[in-house]
């Protein structure tokens, strides 16, 4: 018996499933890269803010490096809380509708930064 037709049918059925899984893995990798980029930029911006105490330049620093981002800076006497949220445009976000949200808290006296 010739089983070539059976193998072709199984291949045609499994190919879209394989491509969907591959696309999802690539999209999660891109999401991870975008989150790391936001994470690094907010850390550097908070470090700059603790040194210079210049809110406008800090916001420009983040906006120049990361597109379409929302920035919230809460300044108190002893600490600074900086929160960033960004909407990721990808297949993963279409399914789960998540935003990248990162918060850091910096102590003005010790100049130490912790993830909030």
Image: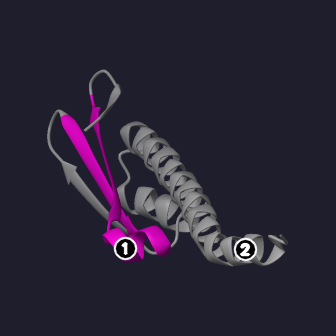
Which residue carries the number 1 mark? 95
- Magenta residues, as a range? 79-108
Which residue carries the number 2 mark? 6
Tell me which numbered mark, 2 or 1, is placed earlier along the sequence.
2
Q: Observer-nearest residue: 53 or 86?
A: 86
Q: Observer-nearest residue: 100 or 15?
A: 15
> Dot 1, how many residues are within 10 Å of its Cα: few (below 14), some (14-19), or many (20+)?
few
**Could you tell me if residue 88 is visible in this image?**
no
* Image quadrant in which the C terminus is located: top left
**Residue displayed at 85% across by 72% down:** 2
Q: Observer-nearest residue: 19 or 47?
A: 19
The secondary structure type at the circle numbered 2 is helix
73 vs 16: above or below: above
Q: Position of residue 109 (x, y in %)?
A: 27, 24
110 vs 45: above or below: above
Quarter location, residue 16:
bottom right
Secondary structure predominantly adopted by residues drawn in magenta: strand
Q: CA distance from mark 2 to mark 1?
A: 33 Å
**Residue displayed at 32% across by 66% down:** 98
> Dot 2, how many residues are within 10 Å of its Cα: few (below 14), some (14-19), or many (20+)?
few
Q: Observer-nearest residue: 40 or 54?
A: 40
**Residue displayed at 48% across by 60% down:** 62
* Image quadrant in which the N terminus is located: bottom right
**Residue displayed at 76% across by 76% down:** 8
Q: Is residue 48 left or right of residue 85?
A: right
Labelled pair 2, 1 in contact (Cβ < 8 Å): no
Q: Position of residue 79 (x, y in %)?
A: 21, 36
| View extreme (left): residue | 77
Magenta span includes 78? no
Q: Position of residue 108 (x, y in %)?
A: 27, 31
Q: Position of residue 84 (x, y in %)?
A: 34, 58
């Amino acid at each position: 018996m010739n089983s070539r037709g059976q193998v072709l049918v199984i291949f045609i059925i499994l190919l879209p499933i394989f491509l969907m899984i591959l696309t999802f893995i690539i999209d999660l990798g891109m999401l991870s890269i975008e989150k790391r980029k936001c994470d690094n930029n907010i850390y550097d911006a908070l470090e700059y803010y603790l040194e210079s105490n210049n809110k406008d330049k800090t916001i420009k620093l983040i906006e120049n490096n990361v597109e379409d981002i929302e920035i919230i800076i809460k300044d108190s006497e002893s600490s600074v809380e900086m929160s960033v949220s960004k909407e990721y445009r990808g297949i993963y976000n279409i399914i789960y509708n998540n935003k990248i949200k990162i918060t850091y808290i910096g102590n003005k006296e010790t100049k130490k930064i912790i993830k909030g």
